[in-house]
Amino acid sequence: MSLLVVGSVALDSIYTPSDKRENILGGSAVFSAFAASFFCPVRLVGVVGEDWNPQHTAALGKQGINTEGLEVVKGGKTFRWTGKYFDNMNDRETLETQLNVLGDFKPKLPESYRRSEFIFLGNGAPSTGLEALDQLQGPGLVVADTMDLWINIAIDDLKELMRRIDGLVLNDSEAKMLTGELNTITAGKKILNYGPKFVVVKKGEHGALFMSEYEIYAVPAFPTESVIDPTGAGDSFAGAMVGYLASQGKLDTETIKKALVYGTLTASFCVEGFSLDRFQEISRKDIDARLEIFRNITQF
Amino acid sequence: MSLLVVGSVALDSIYTPSDKRENILGGSAVFSAFAASFFCPVRLVGVVGEDWNPQHTAALGKQGINTEGLEVVKGGKTFRWTGKYFDNMNDRETLETQLNVLGDFKPKLPESYRRSEFIFLGNGAPSTGLEALDQLQGPGLVVADTMDLWINIAIDDLKELMRRIDGLVLNDSEAKMLTGELNTITAGKKILNYGPKFVVVKKGEHGALFMSEYEIYAVPAFPTESVIDPTGAGDSFAGAMVGYLASQGKLDTETIKKALVYGTLTASFCVEGFSLDRFQEISRKDIDARLEIFRNITQF
């Protein structure tokens, strides 16, 4: 089945302790759509400005991503984010955010997208997610990613969104912030009271946890030393996870666990390069080869 | 096979956000010996003072732990540690340390202990570990636990110890401190250059990593909300891990991975009570029941 991905499309400028890149392709929708595309057909909804290089659209199309829903705003500028990573490559600082066309983004789902069975709302304003859901026809499994920013400045929209989605994805610190709980498991379970049927807590280099009323699954991260640029790792994790669920069209125990594993493995490729650099070098076969290594690392 | 455990025996006073206990049984040797005793016969080497309650010795003996190597110093006082946990139950502050008899501790291995095939040097001064190793007859697999204190104040002894052991166990922050590396995997691999054939990096609520020249294994922690007192969790993890290795008498892939799992599961019981409270309520059967739950949580 297809996966509909709604989220930000960005031009990022990234400073790491040993390197830098300016105006490279990024954004939650881009990373998660590309990650999902290793597993299922993907439909992208996002917005860019006149400064957008059509070669980016071509690169997404080459990967089989449907970009009919990518709106190009005449006279507008694409969302830009500038960030700097500290020596540990985990902590980062935002140096500049230019919302540009993302500030007024009203997602417009092309007619052909409206009957999507799997929907991923990438990190972005909760109101954007709500507007996308309003345009859907028929039922679908909806998973949304969120972050501290929206917990701080758009909690009412986020609460409404949580009542309308099936799964929420967020970092462990954000799960604690959202619930006021100090234990990750307690925080995750509490989020289930807000609406989602399941919660996926991302823990970066420590992996991820899946929680529903009667289930809990844990997956460590793929151990890696080769961290070039962590930008988009969380988006890639979530995109690959939901992409795998869409590819299977079911939500049984084995499928969910394997989706978590594919999420962590796909994210482990993402961090091995800037932007989509590493993703553009690999195929599903490379992810499956890493799956066999991961099996040896984690299965007893 | 038997496991020889050398380390501290303490009377702890513990303050948590919701409770407190004074002068309760603790220490690296006590937690790791008790954890190991679920898997193999254990021989304990440690030192206490005249204030020691013989009922503690009886409690260890009841669990099948050989306490012939527990020295009682006439006129001396047992090592005491007072600590306070913060609201997140992960971070803690040491309020008071009274080394007492531990300050002059020269481990004395009873004749019957000297041919131990598996040796665990619980967290303590590296010089204590070296003195214990000098008394061993014949080869044995030696695993040592260490911490930031010894990296800071006894690095030369620690370096000598690392050249004489097979495995080192330490926290991720300590692995980074010891090596000056910022990536956990890079830090772990670098420690292999210092002497140990394998390194186990403990990550608390995030589980643990095992690394040798050609291997890497990762295990998440058992997800738990019931954290009453985390004191001794790391010692219990290491003790159970080495205890399981001793019970199997081998170091193949499957045994190592299962040892890591038993380590994390045994530690998950440790934190469910103060001191040995929870350990004294359970048996190997309870740990194996949790193993089946853990299998469902982590095996895909």
Image (cartoon, coloured by chain):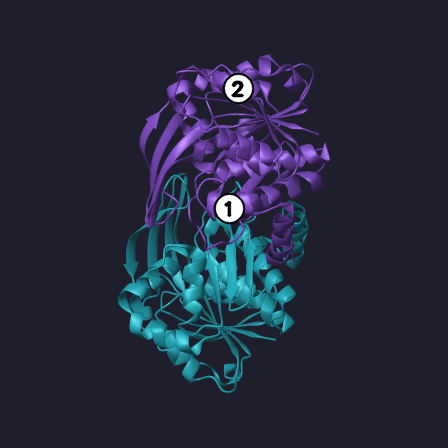
Chain colours: A purple, B cyan
Residue B116: quadrant of the picture:
bottom right
Residue B215 at x, y = what percent?
Answer: 55, 65
- Pinpoint residue B242: horizontal percent, then vertical percent: 54, 67
The chain ID associated with circle 2 is: A
Instruction: Tell me residue A1's x, y (percent).
Output: 71, 30
Local crowd at mark 2 within 10 Å, few (<14), some, or many (≥20)?
Answer: many
Q: Are marks 1 and 2 on the same chain?
A: yes
Q: Element type at marker 2?
A: helix
Identify the residue under disc 1.
A278
| Up-down relation of residue A217 to residue B51 (above or below) | above
* Numbered disc in front, either 1 or 2: 1
Give A209 or B294, whichever is nearer the viewer: A209
Instruction: From the image, tell me which residue sits under label 2.
Output: A129
- In depth, the one of A68 and A92 nearer the eye is A68
Q: Chain of mark 1?
A: A
Using the image as rendered, state which of residue B209 and residue A86 is in the foreground: A86
Residue A25 in which image quadrant:
top left
**Figure label count:** 2
Which quarter of the figure has residue B191? Answer: bottom left
Does any portion of residue B144 appear in the rendered image? yes
Q: Residue at x 45, y 29 (%)?
A: A53
- Name the residue type under label 1: Arg
- Residue drawn where x is 64% and y is 45% of the image: A284
Which is nearer the N-term, disc 1 or disc 2? Answer: 2
